[in-house]
Amino acid sequence: MNTEKLLIDIGGTNLRAGVGNTSSMSISDIQKIKVDSNKHIFDVLHEINSKNNYKEIVISAAGPVTENKISMTNRNLEINASDLEKELNVNECYLLNDWESIGYSLPLMTENDFKTVKKGHLESNQTCLAIGPGTGLGFSVLRHVGNVPYVYPTELGNARSFNDYLSNLFEIEHSKNFIVLEDYLSGTGIKKIYAEKSGKNLTTEEIVSDYLDDDLATYILNNFVIALNNILQDLALTFNARGGIFFAGSLMRTISEMNSINYIKEEFNKHSSEAHSDILKNISINLISKEHTPLYGNLNYSVIRRLHE
């Protein structure tokens, strides 16, 4: 069996590609390519595949996967795995939601691939949570069934049950701009909250860089971490995440260096029930530092999916 797989991660601006080897579980020839249009994406796929004629391609992208198709949420594009198999003349093409892919990268990680935000136990065969507030809010659950990893991508970012809590926390009235969780808890949410409260349209990066220098930016980011902590407590107890919680994405890398992150370190373990406080105390929270995690997740899925069959 050919151990080399073509691994693709498609974002809103860039496409990343690499050649995965399932024997060594390594990736080579990693490329980052800016894609200007949907046509450009398929041109790139044809060009890369034509050089080696891979028999298997694993693609991750933002969007729900149904019936071997993925409708991307960060660009107007639907990818059909069956059509791609014919167009690229490959035997197998698999599609993963981007957070499904990040979830599958977790079993490959060592302690060198993440930074501890809050200490706790790391039980590799127990349920893990992966979460990242970026353009939206990504969230997936890694569970082990008979020692085989299964990842479940979610649509947590579109949940609405936290709206009242968040509108009160940020002192924002209900409006058409704040309908679901990721309208508050994401990079886009930070930008929207700032605009709602100030009338100024700054970028998320500008707001984050003004932390401690701008009172409103400081207020929003401090409350952002408070909200994240409280929601993570609920998620950790809901899924009994004894394998740990893992942050991903550039926004959390920046926030993890801010004073506001201390709230999670100090408050995450607190609960009115001593038994549940002990559960939270034993759950570690970590920041992924490993690069190209979706590609590694795609590679791992190429192996693990055979155990699912």
Image (cartoon, rainbow, N blue to C red):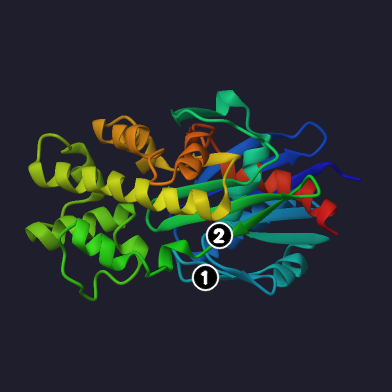
- On the rendered structure, is 245 left or right of 200? right
Residue 267 % position (x, y): 34, 38
Q: Residues within 10 Å of mark 1 (few under 14, many from 20)?
A: some
Residue 67 % position (x, y): 69, 75
**Residue labelled with disc 1:** 77
The quadrant of the image that shows the N terminus is top right
* Foreground pick, 303 / 85: 303
Residue 130 % position (x, y): 53, 47
Quarter of the image where one finds residue 3: top right
- On the rendered structure, is 48 left or right of 304? left
Cα separation, mark 1 vs mark 2, equals 10 Å
Residue type indicated by callout 1: Leu
Q: Is residue 17 visible?
A: no
- On the rendered structure, is 216 left or right of 127? left
**Residue labelled with disc 2:** 41
Quarter of the image where one finds residue 255: top left
The quadrant of the image that shows the C terminus is bottom right
* Foreground pick, 111 / 278: 278
Quarter of the image where one finds residue 87: bottom right
Q: Earlier in the sequence, mark 1 or mark 2?
A: 2
Q: Residues within 10 Å of mark 2 (few under 14, many from 20)?
A: some
Q: Is residue 124 visible?
A: yes
Element marked by disc 1? loop
Residue type indicated by callout 2: Ile
Q: On screen, 239 above or below 30?
A: below
Given this view, does label 1 or label 2 mark the residue nearer the observer?
1
* Foreground pick, 189 / 1: 189
Q: Which residue is farthest right?
A: 1
- On the rendered structure, is 153 left or right of 11? right
Residue 40 % position (x, y): 53, 60
Which residue is drawn at the image coordinates 23% and 41% (left, top)? 208
Q: Is there a contact, CB below 8 Å, between mark 1 and mark 2? A: yes
